[in-house]
Image: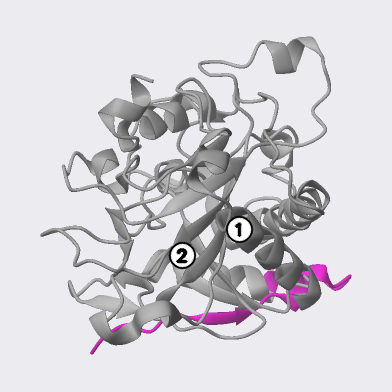
Amino acid sequence: MTQAIPVIDIAGLFSADPAARATVGRALDRACTDLGFLIVSGHGVPDSLVERIRSVSRQFFALPLEDKKALAMPPDRYRGYIAPGNEALAYSLDDVTPPDLKESFSTGPHNVPDNDYSRSARPANFFAANMWPDVPGFRATWEEYYAAMEQLAGTLMRGFALGLGLPETYFDAAIDRHITNFSVLHYPPQTIPPLPGQLRAGAHTDYGSLTILKTDESPGGLQVHGLDGAWIDVPFIPGTFVVNLGDLMAEWTNDRWRSTLHRVVNPPAEAGAAADRISMAFFHQPNYDAVIECLPTCTDAAHPPKYGRTTSGEHVWAKITKHRTPETVDG
């Protein structure tokens, strides 16, 4: 029987009642143990904000290609525009495939203080300045959405702590200066057949603690690799977000929780303009110097730690530099 993506109402995490928060924590633990993918409702993010960022992002992607390339992502930081043909997510798993059939625009943390901590970020410039297109309302809307996702990610991390049998605030000190990248991904209609093995986004796992994804209803969407080997279509449910774990969280939990393979498939050839797709992904990543090692509740005599000690920054930069195509990484 094909697995279903669990839908969890997380409204209890905003409750003053510890029992309500603990109930959600247990549901999150089950979902993260079983599949590593879930759909959340009760999150408190207004639909109007989602529609505003979708609108300004579509305005950006409708610009002439040369205008978008003026904001091309530099090789030393994850900021700006990636044109079609310059990224292949399957590279991060050493699977060499044709480039993904998408374009994207990305930002990092906003309103970063100019202090020693920010200037010393290693192994990359995780607090680099963001790049902004000349689209009315773009920057303000993106910053507002980023702040909303930042709050939601913090709430989910507290729910994760409860699910893992840790103090509710356990992760707070590891994410108070996080290095999250936020990307809006545009999958254009496909006017020519894809190459063999070419997808909108090749099969990959995410890298950090969690990803908060907002999709749309257009054909050619997200699929998750189930435990039985079958690909599961992630349903579009209005008013919800898709949440999945990244490799860092899997390692942090000693593989108690799953970082699950997923991909974005091509639309049917007859879909035409209706296949135009926008997805918004908040790739939550702990502080660059946060130490990642086996959590105390995820190891015992029968389950010794599988992974060595690393930092969030070292972990994510190794992944990022693998999934950009060689031409992009070399500049």
Kindly identify the amino acid type of the residue bearing the numbered disc 1: Phe
- Residue 177, quarter of the rendered image: top right
Report if the CB atoms under discs 2 and 1 are less than 8 Å apart: yes
Q: Secondary structure at mark 2?
A: helix
Q: Nearer the viewer, residue 281 or 170?
A: 281
Q: Position of residue 170 (x, y in %)?
A: 69, 44
Q: Position of residue 268 (x, y in %)?
A: 27, 81
In the image, is residue 160 above or below residue 75? below
In the image, is residue 261 above or below residue 265? above
What residue is rendered at 37% in x and 34% in y? 319
Tell me, yes or no, whether the highlighted magenta stretch contains residue 326: no
Q: Residue furthest left?
A: 196
- Residue 155, quarter of the rendered image: bottom right
The residue singled out by tag 1 in the image is 160
CA gap between label 2 and label 1 equals 9 Å
Q: Secondary structure at mark 1?
A: helix
Kindly identify the amino acid type of the residue bearing the numbered disc 2: Cys
Q: Is residue 295 visible?
A: no
- Residue 263, quarter of the rendered image: bottom left
Q: Nearer the viewer, residue 312 or 274?
A: 274
Give the side of residue 75 with respect to residue 152, left or right: left
The N terminus lies in quadrant? bottom left
The residue singled out by tag 2 in the image is 32
User: Where does the magenta region start and end?
Assistant: 1-22
Q: Position of residue 51 (x, y in %)?
A: 72, 72
Q: Position of residue 252 (x, y in %)?
A: 46, 42
